[in-house]
Image (tube, helix red, strand yellow):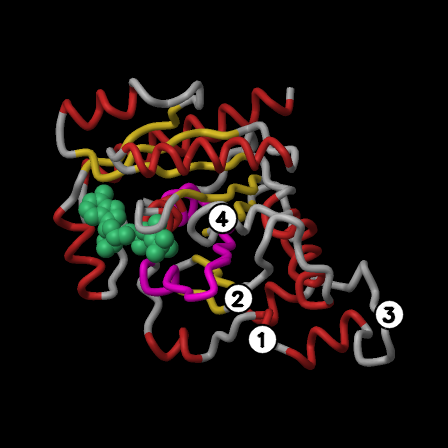
Amino acid sequence: MEQVAGSGARALKVAVAGKGGVGKTTLTSLLAGYFRDQGRRVLAIDADPSPCLGEALGFPAAKLEMLAPLSEMDELIAERTGSDSGGFFKLNPRVDDLPERFSQVHDGVRLLLLGSVQHGGAGCFCPASTLLQQLVRRVMLSKDEVVLLDLYAGVEHLGRATADSVDVMLIVVEPTMRSIKTAIQVRDLAADIGITNVLLVGNKLAGEEDVRLIAENTSGIPVAGVLPQSGAATAADREGSSLYRLDTSLSLAIEEIATRLESTVAAAAS
Ligand SMILES: Nc1ncnc2c1ncn2[C@@H]1O[C@H](COP(=O)(O)OP(=O)(O)OP(=O)(O)O)[C@@H](O)[C@H]1O
Ligand SMILES: [Mg+2]
């Protein structure tokens, strides 16, 4: 049920990270639905070079076809950074109008594709990554706005470009030691770029054993909540439809995660 954002709502920028296939996109789409229903304006940014957040949000194919990743818009990048006028380019390109101009909206959620930002921890110093970096840093925000950044799997993207300006990073894990190991690497790299507000989200939990595995191996990362293994998630994925509202246990879990996330950000800001 849609609500109007309360006066206590604050602008929120969240990055979602973790090992490949753990459920980053699924979590991002569920949070988008939750915050939209709270009356917040939601900008979902797909930072995966092979994007699929649009499908998870239930965007129709026709709208997705109209979306191109910003990193592939050579003319725009050249125009904004001045990079075709010789060896130098602007480090501070204008970005404020990009979300409005290059996104699509479906069911109250705005979607923007970032494309391939950079690879390697040191980062690429080029016009495209400068534009995207500025966009992620400066896209913000009226009080009721929420930006959700669905990151590329693993740890390589955690160079400075993508996520260093977020309020909180959610690291998704499955009940596997491998995904937990990646989560610890992500947490450590996030700390290197100044993100200390990091929360763990357990996904695809099928029983007590899974709950225990995650609880016993958090390596000190606070847990925002856990999402159960869900047949509805598989079905929604198969059909390319939105999972939000299809599974009550997921809805309850996402509410808990979002509440924890907001209170963590509020505590860090005070
Ligand atoms: N709670 C869940 N229950 C059952 N299946 C799930 C759940 N969460 C995610 N999945 C399934 O797991 C697969 C991976 O999910 P998703 O695409 O969200 O992961 P990801 O971390 O974004 O992957 P990638 O690294 O490829 O971007 C999908 O098939 C999705 O439907
Ligand atoms: Mg994904």
Residue at the disc numbered 2? 115
Of pointers 1 and 2, the one earlier in the residue sequence: 1
Q: Quadrant of the C terminus?
A: top right
For marks 1 and 2, give the CA distance: 7 Å
Dot 4: what SS? strand
Residue at the disc numbered 1? 72
What crowding class fits label 1: few (fewer than 14 Cα within 10 Å), some (14-19), or many (20 or more)?
some
The residue that appears at 46% across and 79% down in the rendered structure is: 66
Amino acid under disc 3: Phe
Q: Nearer the viewer, mark 4 or mark 3?
A: 3
Q: Quadrant of the N terminus?
A: top left
Is residue 2 at all visible to an observer of this figure?
no
For marks 2 and 4, give the CA distance: 15 Å
Q: Which residues are magenta?
A: 32-56
Nearer the observer, 178 or 127? 178
Occupied quadrant, residue 203: top left
Of pointers 4 and 3, the one earlier in the residue sequence: 3
The residue that appears at 63% across and 46% down in the rendered structure is: 142
Residue at the disc numbered 3? 88
